[in-house]
Amino acid sequence: MNDALPPKLQATLKRAERLEWWTIGLIATVIAVMGLAMGSSQVMKTAWIEDCLSLTAPIVFLMAARVERHRPTSRFPNGFARAPGLAFAIAAAALAVLGGVLLVESVMSLAAREHATVGGVVILGREVWLGWVMVAAQLYSIAVPVVLGRLKLPLARELNDKTLFTDAQTQKADWMTGVAGIGGVIGIGLGWWWADALAAGVISLGILHDGVRALRSASAELIDGAPRELDGVDVAADANALHASMSARFPGAEIHLRELGRVIAVQVVGAVPPGATLDPADYWPGDPARSWRLGHVGFVPPRPEGG
């Protein structure tokens, strides 16, 4: 539950939620601008779809934060600490699926040698090439998510929230999408028929890469794998340190670590718990300020001889 977090982190979570609400509002303006400037360009369509997709992570983050606050019930006696993990899996799956679909569509456009055309539009009584409007829209679509992504990254690291981190990383990297989009539009203006579909393919590859990487980490959490790093599929450094510390403290016992949302749960199999009741934080081997990461320590005593 959120109220199990230290007061400082509860304040951080509140800031993250406010930032995600701002994200939804600002990205909505990006979607509107990109939609108005889209025309018949494949790359603009792909970039617009990516902008729409970028709303998934903020929405599921806010939903998970709300569900996580619920107290345990008879149907969910273990509480809702894994809500952020489910949100992370949903966001990752959405990225991966849509990235694959857009990549196939781009390849088919290249194979069919589709020629995108960009005409003109009248602005303030003067005819302007629509490509310049598209470029301006792309520049706006770069600025908003890049700023939001940079603001979210420190909060995601502090909270150890994979959904927020993936959202931040994806938005921070949106400048590459914008550059590819601008290149595709300029390519159309230069008469390169393949530039539009190729740029769309580059964007979709980036979406697919982000989705697959996030989905691998999310899957590991859902099947009770060892806690993973925020930015990859390797076992988290603090989890490795905790495993080593617990193994030294309870020699001969099996140490099982799994991630429950933001926190780690430890099960010590084949050892008797200490006589004195200890707070989970007493087992944390690293920075005491991060001891909240250890949410639960359980023991499974060894079986009696002949049992």
Image: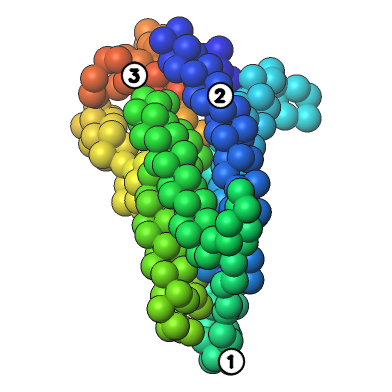
Q: Which mark is residue 112?
A: 1
Callout 2 secondary element? helix
Residue 213 in the image: state x and y as whole percent.
42, 58
Above or below for 50 versus 303: below
First in sequence: mark 1 vs mark 2: 2
Q: CA distance from mark 3 to mark 1?
A: 57 Å
Q: Residue at x 63, y 53 (%)?
A: 125
- Give the number of the mark in front: 1 or 2: 1
Residue 31 in the image: state x and y as whole percent.
62, 48
Q: Residue at x 72, y 29 (%)?
A: 76
- Give the number of the mark in front: 3 or 1: 1
Q: Answer few, some or many: residues within 10 Å of disc 2's Cα (few below 14, many 20 plus, some between 14 and 19).
A: many
Residue holding disc 3: 291
Q: CA distance from mark 3 to mark 2?
A: 23 Å
Q: Amino acid at mark 1?
A: Ala
Q: Amino acid at mark 2?
A: Glu
Q: Residue at x 51, y 34 (%)?
A: 261
Q: Residue at x 49, y 13 (%)?
A: 10
Callout 3 secondary element? helix
Above or below for 240 versus 1: below
- Give the number of the mark in front: 3 or 2: 2
First in sequence: mark 3 vs mark 2: 2
From where the camera sits, is residue 139 visible? yes
Q: Amino acid at mark 3?
A: Ser
Above or below for 82 versus 12: below
Left or right of 19, for residue 69: right
Residue holding disc 2: 17
